[in-house]
């Protein structure tokens, strides 16, 4: 199984995808004239001013839902793996893919808002919707929808739950075990798996509103607590920070693990962490209630900063400052070995050791708790994304029990992922991320050259900003954007209400 997973990843995560992610981000940064810098203050304003409705959630709730997908195991275990396999220089490439990825996030999330639909009194949208409506290629949209259901309904939940199980096992030990059909399992992982699926089932059977309310409370709390602890650790070793920053930058271009490993692992874990271009963020963006599509695009671009430039950097600085990491070389050798050879690299151990080196006896349980919240809210986001794509397929193919089956499959995958080995779980997760990234980035590039809807929306929004309008409006037809039926109908209704009054 491990060999099959590694072989598939070798094809999917070839250098072509690495440079596609970086190249797309650079291209969209240039054509939007560095939207992620120019509109930074507007991102803050929009984040605090949005309101929800019966059909949609607020901009902040949409940010929280998407952040619950972005801020997950990748921020703790993913950063550790990037350093362990790519060296400290991999962190620099995570920063690069985050900065340029913010522009990609704007493009894909604005597209999602433009082409969203309303079903059963709720907003639905995402890459499958804008691929069909903007590209006019329904077959391609179906491929993305099916790939996303498989990725977020089965593959990626295994990574998040496995990371929780591994962290809990680090705290309580793996000595007490039992033999099952799945192999030898520690009681720590078994109890953890049972608890996760019970709580997950309770929340996902409550719908998107329950998910949104849960994440808007938990996401800011868990991110703040984690960053505060990391700031304390960095502050106690502040004299080491310049050395660590220079180590990251220097190793990015003369990497100890090889230039391919540094860039490859940095981009892979960067995309896994901030999800820019992966196609997951647009699903939450489409669910937001906004006056203009560009507004949610800007909010989603800001979430990339929070994820990588804050949370991932905090993890990297803790690990590198305290020296609690190894760097793998060829075969079984180590280029750098500060920890025992049997310490799992594809997991949260490096981060747990980093916190424990300062707060003795607290590091492992604190990181386990943080990981639970990070990873659990990501599981909720994955369900929301998978559900959106099931709804997309249901527009054509009637699936009376489709949503129930999805819930049952995701819960089963979560349980299975918790008790399995870390390398297999992360490998399967990488396959899911890679498939979605390939399909979505190619899609948004083709859409851009066909009609440039997100860029037209940005220019229209900036025009209204300059005019100082009190309430933003969006008229897709006047901008040459076709098939944006939701916004066309909203504008018609608004004009009809004005004429009557």
Image (cartoon, rainbow, N blue to C red):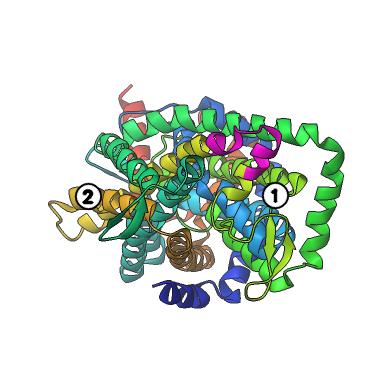
Magenta region's main secondary structure?
Answer: helix
Residue beneath the point at 47% across and 58% down: 422
Residue 353 appearing in the image:
yes
Residue 354, magenta (yes or no): yes
Q: Quadrant location of the N terminus? A: bottom left
109 left or right of 183 in image? right
68 left or right of 75 in image? left
Furthest toward the front, the residue is 175
Which residue does the numbered mark 1 point to in the structure image? 324
Residue beneath the point at 33% across and 41% down: 191
Residue beneath the point at 35% across and 53% down: 185
Q: Secondary structure at mark 1?
A: loop
Where residue 408 is drawn, which disc sits there?
Answer: 2
Q: Mark 2 and 1 residues: CB-CB less than 8 Å, in contact?
A: no
Q: Quadrant location of the C terminus? A: top left
Q: Secondary structure at mark 2?
A: helix
**Magenta residues, start to end:** 353-367
Neighbourhood count class around disc 2 (C-alpha, 10 Å): few under 14, some 14–19, many 20 upward = few
Residue 116, magenta (yes or no): no
Residue 362 on image: x %, y %: 59, 32
Residue 433 on image: x %, y %: 47, 61
Residue beneath the point at 49% across and 35% down: 369
476 left or right of 55 in image? right
């Amino acid at each position: 199984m491990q060999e099959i997973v590694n072989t598939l990843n070798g094809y999917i995560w070839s250098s072509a995808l690495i440079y596609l992610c970086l190249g797309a981000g650079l291209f969209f940064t240039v054509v939007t004239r560095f939207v992620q810098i120019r509109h930074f203050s507007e991102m803050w304003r929009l984040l605090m001013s949005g309101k929800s409705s019966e059909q949609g959630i607020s901009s902040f709730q949409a940010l929280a839902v998407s952040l619950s997908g972005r801020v997950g195991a990748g921020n703790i275990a993913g950063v550790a793996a990037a350093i362990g396999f790519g060296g400290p220089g991999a962190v620099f490439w995570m920063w690069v893919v985050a900065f340029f990825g913010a522009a990609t996030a704007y493009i894909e999330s604005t597209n999602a808002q433009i082409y969203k639909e309303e079903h059963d009194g709720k907003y639905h949208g995402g890459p499958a919707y804008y691929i069909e409506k903007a590209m006019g290629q329904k077959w391609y949209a179906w491929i993305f929808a099916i790939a996303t259901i498989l990725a977020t309904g089965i593959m990626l939940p295994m990574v998040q739950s496995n990371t929780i199980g591994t962290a809990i096992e680090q705290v309580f030990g793996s000595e007490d075990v039992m033999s099952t059909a799945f192999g030898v399992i520690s009681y720590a992982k078994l109890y953890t798996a049972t608890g996760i699926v019970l709580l997950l089932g309770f929340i996902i059977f409550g719908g998107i509103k329950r998910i949104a309310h849960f994440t808007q409370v938990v996401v800011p709390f868990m991110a703040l607590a984690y960053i505060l602890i990391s700031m304390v650790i960095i502050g106690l070793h502040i004299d080491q920070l310049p050395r660590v920053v220079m180590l990251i930058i220097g190793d990015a271009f003369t990497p100890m693990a090889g230039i391919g490993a540094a860039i490859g692992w940095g981009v892979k874990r960067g995309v896994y962490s901030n999800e820019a271009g992966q196609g997951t963020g647009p699903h939450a963006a489409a669910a937001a209630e906004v006056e203009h599509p560009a507004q949610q695009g800007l909010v989603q671009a800001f979430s990339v900063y929070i994820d990588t430039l804050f949370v991932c950097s905090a993890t990297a600085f803790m690990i590198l400052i305290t020296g609690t990491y190894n760097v793998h070389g060829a075969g079984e050798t180590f280029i750098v070995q500060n920890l025992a050879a049997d310490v799992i690299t594809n997991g949260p151990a490096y981060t747990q050791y980093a916190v424990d080196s300062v707060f003795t006896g607290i590091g492992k349980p604190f990181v386990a708790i943080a990981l639970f919240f990070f990873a659990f809210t990501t599981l909720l986001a994955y369900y929301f994304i998978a559900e959106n794509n099931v709804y997309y397929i249901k527009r054509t193919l009637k699936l009376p029990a489709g949503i129930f089956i999805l819930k049952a499959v995701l819960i089963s995958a979560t349980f299975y992922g918790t008790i399995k080995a870390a390398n297999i779980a992360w490998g399967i997760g990488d396959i899911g991320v890679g498939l979605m990234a390939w399909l979505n980035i190619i899609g948004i590039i083709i859409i851009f050259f066909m009609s440039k809807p997100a860029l037209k929306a940005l220019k229209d929004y900036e025009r209204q900003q300059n005019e100082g309008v009190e309430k933003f409006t969006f008229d897709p037809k006047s901008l040459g954007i076709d098939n944006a039926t939701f916004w066309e109908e909203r504008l018609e209704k608004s004009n009809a209400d004005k004429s009557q009054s």
